[in-house]
Image (spheres, helix red, strand yellow):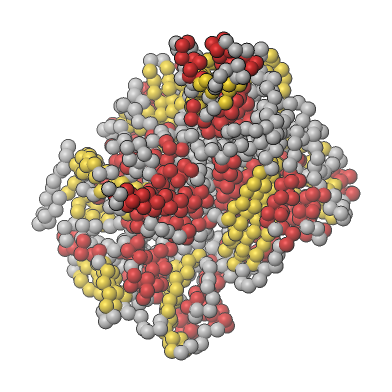
Amino acid sequence: MRSFEHVNAPDIKTAVALLREASAEAIAGGTDLLGELKARVRSPKRLVNLKTLSQLRQISYSQKSGLKIGALVTLAQIEHHPVIRERFSLLAQAASSAATPQLRHLGTVGGNLCQKPRCWYYRNKLFRCWLKGGEKCFAEDGENRYHAILGADRCHAVHPSDLAPALIALDATLRVVGPDLDGEISLEELYTKPTESHRHMTILGPGELITEIRVPTPKEGARGVYLKAMERQSWSFALVSVAAHMSFEGERIVDARLVLGGVAAIPWRAKDSEKILVGQKLSEELAQQAAEAAVAGAQPLRDNAYKVPLTQGLVKQALRAVAGEISVQS
Amino acid sequence: MPKVIKTKTEFEGRTLEEYVVVEGEGLEPWEPHAPLKFVGKGISRIDGPERATGKALYTCDVQLPGMLYGKILRSPHPHAKIKKIDTHRAEKLPGVRAVLSSHNTPKISFRRQTFLFDEIVRYVGDEVACVIADSEEIAQDALELIEVEYEPLPFVLDPEEALQPDAPKVHSWGNLLNGEPEVYERGDLNRGWAEAHVIVEGTFRTQCALHNCMEPHGSVALWEGDTLTVWDSTQHIFGVREGLARLLGLPLHKVRVIKKYMGGGFGSKNNLGKYTVIAALGAKVTGRPVKIILDRHEENLAAGNRPSSVQHLKIGAKHDGTLTALELKALVAAGAYCLWPPSLGGPARELYLCPNVKTAQYTVFTNTGPLSAFRAPGYVEGTFALESLMDELAKKLALDPLELRLKNYAEFDQTTGRPYSTKGLRECYERGAKLFGWPKRPESSGRFRRGFGMASQIWSGNGMPPAYALVKINPDGSATVITGTQDIGTGTKTVLAQIAAEELGFPMEKISVEIGDTQTGLYAPLSAGSMTVASVGPAVRMAAHDARQQLLEVAAQVLEVPRESLTISDGRLKSPALKEPITVQEVLKNLENFMIIGRGAREPNPQDVTVNTFGAQFAEVTVDPETGAVKVERIVALHDSGRVINPLTLSSQVEGGIIQGLGYALYEQRVMDRNTGIVVNGNLEHYKIPTVLDVPEILCDMIDRPDLRANNLGAKGVGEPPIIPTAAAIANAVADALGVRIFELPITRDRVLKALGKE
Amino acid sequence: MATKAARPKRLKVTVRGPGKTQIQLIVNGQAHEVLVEPRRTLLDTLRKDLGLTGAKNACDEGTCGACTVLLDGKPIYACMALAIECDGRSLETIEGLAQAGKLHPIQQAFIEEDALQCGFCTPGQIMAVKALLDSNPKPTLDEVKRALSGNLCRCGAYLKIVKAALRAAELLEKAQGDTYAQSHKD
């Protein structure tokens, strides 16, 4: 790490003001940021510590207003929270599949949603890649087994979060506070494909902070699952993950949200698959159709074509799991 | 008395002929069923408390007064000429005490292939300069201030490309080690092919694997006058001493190398590293102790690897499975420098009875990180290819894989014509098959596909001289074993204590073991090649025996009883001539500070037999055809390494070898950017080693039959054998599950899905 | 130089660093005043400033678990925390486990089960077990494995580490029973 100054944020307003200044960076759990600082791919002059904002550590729930998770709530808190485990099990599954117990005790939900890609070119000081302000994406004709198969353009990195697909499947919204704003956006809106003029994976600008995540209470009888394919049994970012959340009337699917992780620069809403599912009774053929639709338009690179069948397989397993047919192993 | 003889010794697949001083003869091995008190018992580690309390001092824990830290600047280019190095800005940074580079250090030859700081860099990670500073943070800051002007040179990363005539040259003399392949041949290959009813062949590819010892490589150097003391995380303190003395022009008695605890080596710490020499030079220049510990990324760039291989293998056999011919052409990517190439052809030459065999190994320089030994170098890779193709042959002949192996059981060492001292492989097969349930392998049912596979292991593990030990008996009846070996995590200290206690007739708690110091210790070989116990153990037993003889001599005189009537057990002397047993302490207490010093040396290896280790492993896997996930459900391992000294620490070795083998089979591979030669996964995030959740059920057992020709213990090595067959057994199980074979490691989801035609 | 206080316009905050600033760490029940740069990790502070070298630096980027310590009772990687952000907080390290030369039951179990080889990851493994058993004294096999899934062991002692954790749970339960019996004897 290059040297930096350190400030404890006394309140949200001051935090916003401090983070507006050039070369200031927010630190919450630090599990993502410190990695970048240690790799010296980023070197802010000042870190603004948000952990002092204790009002952002709360989890609350009511049937009416749904689940509210402060941005500083750790992944471990989410994983172990009884209400989340019972009523939002998809979210608890996603949290417990992320990283390791130690990292989950440090890492916060806000930080998890805003984390930078794990792309090995992005994280390596020797490559000045496009996302870091350079000219090219080294993955494009380089080592791209972990990279995007959907919607990639100038950058082929994938969004690494486990919580994001789960929360989008649950239709979560965020409270975002910034120098000139204090409002609510859907989590889906947070993510954006990086563009020439905005080489970031979220729309947040300087000084803009997520303070709270809100999840509406699922409909009665709604079911969800989070499945994650890794290279080993734990402690890996997803090769592909699937968050599925569906509600039923009888056996008929009335609402379906299917979100993929590990396949694109943003958590990827498989809307075509959702359309196929809604109004139908889940069958093996329907699952197959939905799985194929999920990766329609995939443009794999040299080494990541396996993600296409893997995504299909995982989507089918997720749908079966939601339908409660079989227990599954990813 | 020492005498000098010429001897042949096998080490990691090659036979070495050398002069050795022979000592230590005349002590017979314990009888196979001798009632032993400590040897053969599962005694917990005598240094367990230090390791479990955080008190054990590893090299990276050494902190000396005034100590400085060194950080190495490494080449970002795979091949370049250094035109200019400007260190002025770095030197001016507050806290920087020195910057070492080719400008201000002697031109020290390294491996005869490069220099400590060479003007040509040959891989991304090659050493360019080193900052010595008050803290690691300052040293890191200063690295960014060193300005280096490189003239990039053409480079080659792929070993097959490196053999092309127009390939860029890694070294001026060419890209092939020694300018020619290493060829072995017996019989007549053409006749073998002519006699064959079936021929199978395949091209097998194995990945570059990284050791990732938990403790990185590193050294702390301290000068006191003209004496250099180095704490080093090494598998060979005497080798490091010799190297430092030679490269720095110091006499051996002025160089002291210490290694008390070590966080793993697996072969990567067999040799002197540049960082050690740099630390010594940095300490000399600054007049202060200097510590250089590689970080995880450097560890994975510059500290060695199991090299990738391409193996073209062809086997011919008769209808009944009798092998007629076996041919291997292997390509090994040495990286930029190469000290001791692995021997991939070992298994093909040795494992099965076959009259016509040819192996040719091309060890090829590339502009990539240099190889080093990695737990059973060559044999892990070679066994994967051989045992995979044996299964293909069995399939073609409609024979059970185990039956095919038994059909071609080699009763003698075909490379020398000598018999094996002992060979328990048949029992490994039989007992392993029974434990595993090999004959009754169920068919797959349900969504997952099940598969079963097995593979065999052959490896030296014989140990060799020279190795020396002292056993001193203190006036209070305790004893200290002194030798210059190292415990790299295998349990050496404990095993040596057991041997000494057994031979002396003392209780375990009366024994301490001092190792890991060249100044006070006696020479012992590197802790590699599965040879520590079989090399040092016999010397310790001999020393304990010598000490015991002296003790009996003294006791007979003190107690005034016939020497022949005396025995020792539980630290007490017994004799029919004594009313009751008397403690050693009682006997010695009136002799002031009299100290008994027993001396022992490793006896020579037998010349008329081959001493080897053997084993067999059986694996069960399930494969999810939808997602390509492979899960190893269980492994059964049976090994024959002669007498088992400590079944507890031994089973740890076996489990550990299997788990490393599992990682190699399924997850681990160095990924290098093909366009720049930069390793992109030189960390533990993307280079995936097994976690606790990846570990299958493991059942291991030993044949545990003393090899009475091996040495005075009847014990052979077990560090490497268990990793040898694991990947092959898993690959065979996966092939059984899928119905098609994957010829490449690791067996990742992409390869499984591709094999199933899904990609 | 100790704390450097700067007051940017209109904002009432204390800026510390980039030079050294004083912090207090409560390690194994004892308070330590240390001067650290904001960029100093908790791990480096423990190892280099306090000489507590039990927690190991094996990756320095939160990928191995060898530096596991307990922060306010929760297991974390000391390499992924800034020392300055632990100011005033309580830490438990491997050095705090053995009391008056008597091994902690977890340490005892690790030795007896041979749940270590090179021993380099061992302090981290033991602290991960400690965190588990503090919050869940009777874990299932699966809970043990999940609790240890953030601690790599390259020697592959995993099977025995799991056994040791389960055995430690038994030893601790027995020890507590004995303590209870002892306290009710008089």
> From what the image shows, is residue B514 above or below residue B565?
below
Of the 4 image quadrants, the one containing the N terminus of chain A is top left
> From what the image shows, is residue B398 above or below residue B253?
below
Q: Residue at x 59, y 33 (%)?
A: B37
Q: Residue at x 85, y 49 (%)?
A: B322
> From what the image shows, is residue B2 above or below residue B369?
above
Q: Nearer the viewer, residue B617 or B347?
A: B617
Q: Position of residue A306 (x, y in %)?
A: 56, 65
Q: Position of residue C17 (x, y in %)?
A: 20, 44
Residue B13 visible (yes or no) = no
Residue positioned most to the front? B579
Q: Nearer the viewer, residue B541 or B397?
A: B541
Q: How many marks?
A: 0
Q: Residue at x 80, y 34 (%)?
A: B419
Q: Position of residue B89 (x, y in %)?
A: 31, 34
Q: Nearer the viewer, residue C83 or B161?
A: C83
Q: Residue at x 30, y 49 (%)?
A: C185
Residue C139 visible (yes or no) = yes
Q: Is residue A13 left or right of residue B729?
A: left
Q: Is residue A121 left or right of residue B754?
A: left
Q: Position of residue A200 (x, y in %)?
A: 35, 63
Q: Is residue C175 left or right of residue B693?
A: left
> From what the image shows, is residue A47 above or below residue A86?
above
